[in-house]
Every structure is written in C-alpha cells, then in structure tokens.
Amino acid sequence: MLLSLLAACTCPPFSDMDVTGAGTPDLHANVAQAIADFAAWTGRDGVCVPGVDVREEVRARGEEVEGSYGGPHTWIWMAADTDDVERTVLHELCHAIDAEEGHSKAHPDLFPGDSISDTKLYPTKAARQEESFAQACSTGASEMDLSLTLDAVCGGSRWGLDIAYAQTEIYSAFPRTPVTDAGVDLRVTTRTLDVGADLTVVDAVAVESTLLLLVERSTPEGTIWGLVSIDPATGTRLRTLPLGTGTAAEAGVQLVRSDGPARLLVGWTEGDRDLLDVDLATGTTTALVEGLDIPYHSTHAAWSEGALYVTGHRGDGTPLMVEWAGDTLVSLDPAVSGYTIRPMPGGVEVYASGAVLHYVGGVGSIVLARSIGTTDVVPVGDTWRLDVGTAGIGRVWVLTDVESGSQGLLAEPCQTLAHYPTTLVTVGVDIFLFDPVTTDATGRAIVPMLQLGA
C-alpha cells in the first residue's frame, strides 16, 4: 500500500509522460512534440502530469471543452478534434505548472481574470486568474528578443505584461539572441513633393538620384495612369509622363526596383506582359521585351546588372522566381515565395516569409533562415537592413544584420509607427515612406521621411 501511494505521488519527468488514445500516428506525434517543446522551453524536469489522454469528447462542468487538467498527478484530457493541438497541450501544461509554482496566485495584477467571462466554467476568482495565466502562457515561446529589449529600454510592454511574464519566467530556457546597439541615428521628418493636382500616388522607386512615382488621375472620361519624376532633395516635379488609360492595377503596371535605368512591367496576363524602358529625359518608353510569361498577381520585380528578376507566386500558390536576360526567360529554383526584392551586386536579394535569399549567377541561396520584414527593406551601411517590424502590439523600426540575423536598436529605439508604410524608398540618407496618397488641388503631397545618420 505504501509503495502504491509513493508511486502515485511521484512526478514523472516530461520524457516519461504517456500519450494515449490518439487515433492516428500524426496526432500522437503532435501531442508528443508539444510536450517536448514545453520541456525544452521551460527547462523544467516535469509538472506532475502522468500523460495526455486523447478522447472523443472532453467536458468540464457540463460544458464541452478542448482540454482539461484536473490537478496534480492527474492526466490531461484532450479532445481529438481540437483546432490547435500544440496550443491545447501547452494550455493544460501551463495550468499544471501554475498549480505547482503558483504564478497566477502570486501575480494577481498580471493575471486578474477580468477578461474571463465564462463564470460557469470558471466560477471563482481564483479559477479565472488561473485561466488568465494559462491563456497568456499557452501562446508558447516566441522570438521576442526585440520586444523584450524594447520593454526594458522604453518601459511598459508591447505584448502585454502577462505574455511578457510568460516569456521571461515560464519559457526562460528558450534561446534568445541579445539585441545590440546598432549606433544608427534616425530622425523622422516630412518632405513636400510637387506631384501634381488631384493625383493618387500608387507606388514609388528610386532611379539613381530621382524619385519615380506611379500615379493615377480620375477624369470625366475615365482614369489614366502615368509617371511623375521628382527631385528628392527639393521635392520639385521634374517631368510628368501620362502613359495609359485605366488604373495601374487594371493595366497590370508595376514599377521595377532598379540599379540604374527606369523600368516598368505592363500587362495583366501571363504570356502578355511587356518590359518597358523609360527615358526620363525625353518622356518616352521603349519595349525591351514583349510577351513575358510571368503573372501579375503577387509578383515583385527588380532590374540588376542587365537582367530582370521577378519573385512571388503564381495563381496556384506555387513559388515563382524567374530571370530574363538576353531574350531568354529562365525559371530559377524558388525556395519560398518572395514579397520584396532589390538589386545587389551580381543579382538580387529577396525577402520572403521565413528567409532572405540571394540570387547571383542564376543560383539561389538562403543567407538567413528568417524573415526580416513585410514591406520594402532598405540597406543601412554594409550589413544592416531597415524595415518595419512588429515588437508585440507596437510597430517599430528594426535593424537586422542580413548575414547573422542579429537585431540592432536605433539610437532612439522607442519611436513607433501608427501603420505600415507600403513602400520604403531610399535616396542617399533619406528614406521616403509611401502609402497610397491623393494630392490636393495645389498638387502637393506631404510624405513622411526618415533621415539616417552615423
């Protein structure tokens, strides 16, 4: 009898937790992986849970739930049809670690339970506090190096103090890369551009030392699109080039990020897209190649050292990466779908969901297995790249070393943004932020701008 009681009170390590009832090998593996993740992220040996039992239905206080934890030394029950296996397992393991270590009870200010409205399932204040903790903890360990550093530097919390607590106190063994001081000054200012009256700026690129804007104008006869070139130092309009009818989207027009000449892609359908050379001095265009077999939707283009590169994905969702040079269109091996592309010596740099890639000499290689932005990314010095990132619920300027993946803080790191700019265009030390904007009757557009220093 004594041996039975001792066995019942022994807390098994995570490695000895059983998974029962999983109807498929995949479900069994997903539950086991969630347990292994929790063990690795927390650095604990175990939480007095014998295992996870997968059931057709789980009920608590008469209500159907996705998971249930009954207290120390009891099994976690999980519904077989749960929407998110890992989050459900983590949620119940978080209840277990709370029961063992008392986090919600020790920090009622962080986990007040006020947002828990189901008083039938959580009838007491303590139960609601425990659920509040488990919800914050069940988000799992995240790469929040930037967020946590900014919390310390700027005060407050960009994720919420409850999630920040879970990241630092519960998932303390999760590997984090220190965020360093990049030593880069940034000043937020504005510049007035003379774009032209009643125009909508759709997109922008830098062509050598000139800003090139893709614009639209609504007229009684319909919408027309064209280009406007701007002296970025003064905001003076240099030339207006009306080029076509309809909106830019209807015409399938895309500005090409270029290491020199002004280029346009025009045309909607695959097999019917034209690459145009734009002579800004004369206001004329010339077709360099017609009938390119590349889609318009979800593609981004760059011109680098005499070649056109297009990245994105085709209509069926498959990744796309092509190169056109010397009248030949070559499909390159796309690791992932790219969402931003820019010229670099010998080829292009592609920013994608989860990776940064280089295509040089027709060969692609991953230089960083991590995404560094969701909008245009611009170089700052030799290795830093500046983009708009998220640090918790706040949007901030992020400097990332594209080779190492390390992140650096600006000299004034607590500056935030109210929104994401759709395009960043760099000319010298000035970085212009463009969103679709309509000019007034005077033809002026006030454009946010960043100025970077050493």
Image (cartoon, rainbow, N blue to C red):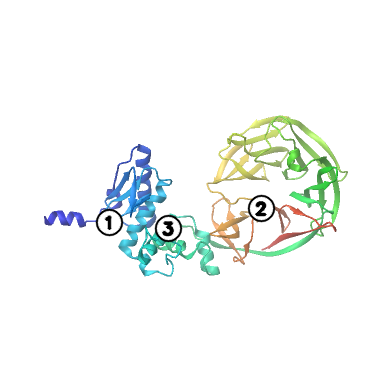
User: Label 2, on which residue?
Assistant: 378
Q: Are the residues at dot 1 and dot 2 in contact (C-beta closer than 8 Å)?
A: no
Mark-to-mark CA distance, 3 and 1: 20 Å
Disc 3 or 1, which lies upstream in sequence? 1
Q: Nearer the viewer, residue 168 or 117?
A: 117
Which quarter shows the C terminus?
bottom right
Name the residue beneath numbered marker 1. 48
Q: Is residue 103 left or right of residue 277?
A: left
Name the kind of residue labelled 2 in the image: Val
Question: What is the C-alpha distance between the residues marked 3 and 2?
Answer: 37 Å
Write the residue at 76% across / 51% down.
201
Q: Are marks 3 and 2 in contact (CB under 8 Å)?
A: no
Secondary structure beneath label 2: strand
Q: How many marks?
A: 3
Where is residue 354 shown, x and y percent of the image? 54, 46
- The residue beneath circle 3 is 135
Amino acid type at image mark 1: Cys
**Which numbered disc flags the more N-terminal residue, 3 or 2?**
3
Q: Which mark's residue is nearer the viewer, 1 or 2? A: 1
